Amino acid sequence: MPMWAVRDMQKFEFTLLLSAPLSFPTDEQLDILFEAGCDDAMFGRTAGVAYADFVREAAGLPQAVMSAIRAIEQAIPGVRISRVEPDDYVTLTDISKRTGWSREYVRLLVIGKRGTGFFPPPLTRLGNARNRIWRWSEVSRWLADHHGAVVPGTSAYPFVAALNNVLELRDTIPALKDNGCDEIAEILSKEQESLELCRAGGA
């Protein structure tokens, strides 16, 4: 999966993973999507997962991604966006590819035998180190603050991480069936102030 690519400062490359029937995309659906403004995307399936590869022009990445999501979901009923890639979740190998450093060097950074230490903790703490997962938004910030590394496109990942969390929440809330709905609603209501601060430029 490629890194975020910005062309002419206005065109953004990204992939949307879709929750869609196995028949998607039919020729008729592709025609509908083209008419809906998705003529800047390639639709297909890989390993059974439907996807849309976009190269979209917009004022910024959030605008590009959200306009693509709205276009697809409004054009084809029953098709929903499940995830945006390149993902914020990364393995040791992913970190190696995104930095251009060897996997062994990254491993030494993780265990504190290289660099300044205090590498971000993984999200998962499975016994097998190969299965550990980190947030790229945290790793890239650590690389900038402690290692002097600058990786192009890293500013996009906090948005992608937040959006993917919202998309996942959208899919999982119906499964609660009133078992925990009030508790989730309470957490979300407390985050409204943070969102308002962010919109006002104060976060």
Image (cartoon, helix red, strand yellow):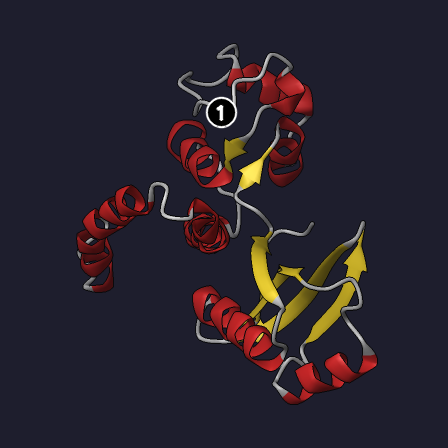
* Vertical position of residue 116 compared to residue 146: above or below: above
Residue at the far bottom: name it.
35
Is residue 187 or residue 30 the one in the foreground?
187
Give the labeled residue for mark 1.
122
Q: Amino acid at mark 1?
A: Pro
Q: Position of residue 57 (x, y in %)?
A: 55, 76
Whether residue 182 is visible here, answered yes or no, is: yes
User: Percent position (x, y) of residue 109?
Assistant: 53, 19
The residue sitting at 62% across, 40% down in the picture is: 98
Residue at x 24%, y 63% (from the top left corner)? 199
Disc 1 packing (10 Å; few <14; some 14–19; many ≥20): many
Q: Quadrant of residue 138?
A: top left
Is 126 rendered above or below residue 64? above
- Residue 175, percent across and down? 48, 48
Name the residue nearer the viewer: 64 or 47: 47
Q: Is residue 5 visible?
A: no
- In this rendering, position of residue 195 left or right of residue 173: left
Left/right of residue 7 with respect to residue 198 in the rendered view: right
Report the front residue among 54 and 171: 171
